[in-house]
Image: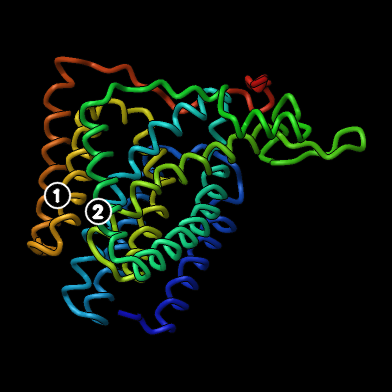
């Protein structure tokens, strides 16, 4: 199904307008968002997404609206997994809290472009090869099983090959220079450590997109629904990070829940030609699994307290750990 071009233009124009208001209106002064501010912005992004969902219902009917809502919920829940890595990256590079929002803003803006390209390639692949959906299904099923039974891996940022390559080929300063990504020092243009952080954020999103985009194709094959549900979930990721960064590790059952969701969607794709699972049923399964994971996590935490990992509050002019050779 091909969505009217005017819908694509209107959606992307609206996204750019909201981002411009956020950047030039609310984030002109670098600061660390408070929990209250993060909660308000999280509610705003969710409300905007649900409002857009209502427009889809009005434009294209309840079936497409259900597909968007299910895809959005899957993407939003999977994006929480990004927060674990964001906390590690910001802590490793000792990024001042006031500059973390700037990194996430530009990282997510770039992610929107990369996601658009990846979704376009995915759509072309699916349309050209019917077996592509089975390949996606097998991949998601394998990923879900591996995530459920696999051990937790330590993310070794220092050994990241792309970061090491950037430092080897390009000049990087040893300390932060305010919120800037580059700085002119003794006649030379240098990258600041904030650029390395931005690169790590981009790498993280691309890696997680390899799971999340096929998962959305398991819900719908409509490119417009796949794209808009991805974008709406990503837009709310910044405020969600500042809201959950200090407590995200308390959701101990989140990863098993995500593994079950990925496995379910993978199985749904593999059974597509044998038995069609209604979108409403998929939405119910995803919602119940997430609610169960959150509820169980809240129940066990009083018995197994987890130390919070606060948002870094280092001096903006301090020297981070950047020797990655």
**Distance in Å between CA atoms under marks 2 and 1:** 8 Å
Q: Residue at x 32, y 62 (%)?
A: 49
Please report contact status of discs 2 and 1: CB closer than 8 Å, yes or no. yes
Q: Quadrant of residue 37?
A: top left
Give the percent coordinates (x, y) of residue 277.
9, 61
Location of the C terminus by quadrant is: top right
On screen, residue 190 versus residue 302, left or right, reads: right
Give the mark nearer the N terminus: 2 vs 1.
Answer: 2
Give residue 190's mark: none
Check the image and name the residue furthest to the right.
Answer: 187
Local SS, label 1: helix
On screen, residue 3 versus residue 142, left or right, reads: right
Local SS, label 2: helix
Relative height, residue 325 to residue 40 (above, below): above
Relative height, residue 256 to residue 273 (above, below): above
Give residue 73's mark: 2
Give the percent coordinates (x, y) of residue 170.
76, 35
Local crowd size for mark 1, using a 10 Å CA cut-off: few (<14), some (14–19), many (≥20): some
Give the percent coordinates (x, y) of residue 222.
30, 71
Relative height, residue 158 to residue 47 (above, below): above
Q: Residue at x 7, y 62 (%)?
A: 275
Location of the N terminus by quadrant is: bottom left
Q: Nearer the viewer, residue 135 or 33?
A: 135
Q: Nearer the viewer, residue 303 or 269?
A: 269
Q: Residue at x 43, y 84 (%)?
A: 6
Q: Residue at x 56, y 28 (%)?
A: 160
- Which residue is label 1 attached to? 287
Give the percent coordinates (x, y) of residue 213.
35, 54
């Amino acid at each position: 199904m091909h969505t009217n071009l005017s819908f694509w233009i209107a959606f992307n124009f609206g996204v750019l307008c909201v981002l411009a208001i956020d950047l030039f209106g609310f984030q002109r002064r670098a600061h660390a968002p408070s929990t209250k501010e993060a909660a308000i912005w999280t509610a705003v992004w969710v409300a905007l997404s649900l409002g857009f969902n209502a427009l889809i219902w009005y434009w294209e009917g309840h079936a497409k609206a259900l597909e968007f809502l299910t895809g959005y919920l899957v993407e939003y829940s999977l994006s929480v997994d990004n927060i674990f890595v964001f906390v590690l990256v910001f802590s490793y590079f000792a990024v001042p809290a006031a500059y973390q929002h700037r990194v996430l803003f530009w990282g997510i803006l770039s992610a929107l472009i990369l996601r658009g390209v990846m979704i376009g390639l995915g759509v072309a692949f699916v349309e050209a090869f019917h077996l592509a959906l089975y390949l996606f299904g097998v991949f998601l099923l394998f990923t879900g099983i591996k995530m459920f039974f696999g051990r937790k891996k330590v993310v070794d940022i220092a050994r990241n090959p792309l970061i090491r390559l950037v430092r080897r080929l390009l000049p990087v300063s040893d300390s932060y220079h305010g919120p800037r990504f580059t700085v002119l020092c003794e006649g030379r243009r240098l990258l600041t450590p904030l650029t390395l952080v931005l690169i790590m954020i981009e790498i993280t999103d691309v890696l997680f997109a390899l799971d999340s985009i096929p998962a959305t194709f398991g819900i719908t094959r409509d490119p417009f629904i796949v794209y808009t549900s991805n974008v709406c979930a990503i837009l709310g990721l910044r405020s969600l990070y500042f809201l959950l960064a200090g407590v995200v590790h308390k959701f101990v059952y989140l990863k098993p829940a995500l593994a079950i969701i990925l496995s379910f969607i993978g199985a749904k794709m593999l059974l597509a030609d044998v038995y069609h699972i209604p979108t409403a049923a998929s939405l119910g399964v995803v919602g119940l699994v997430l609610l169960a994971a959150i509820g169980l996590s809240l129940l066990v935490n009083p018995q197994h307290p987890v130390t919070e990992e606060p948002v870094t509050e280092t001096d903006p002019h301090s020297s981070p750990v950047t020797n990655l050779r």
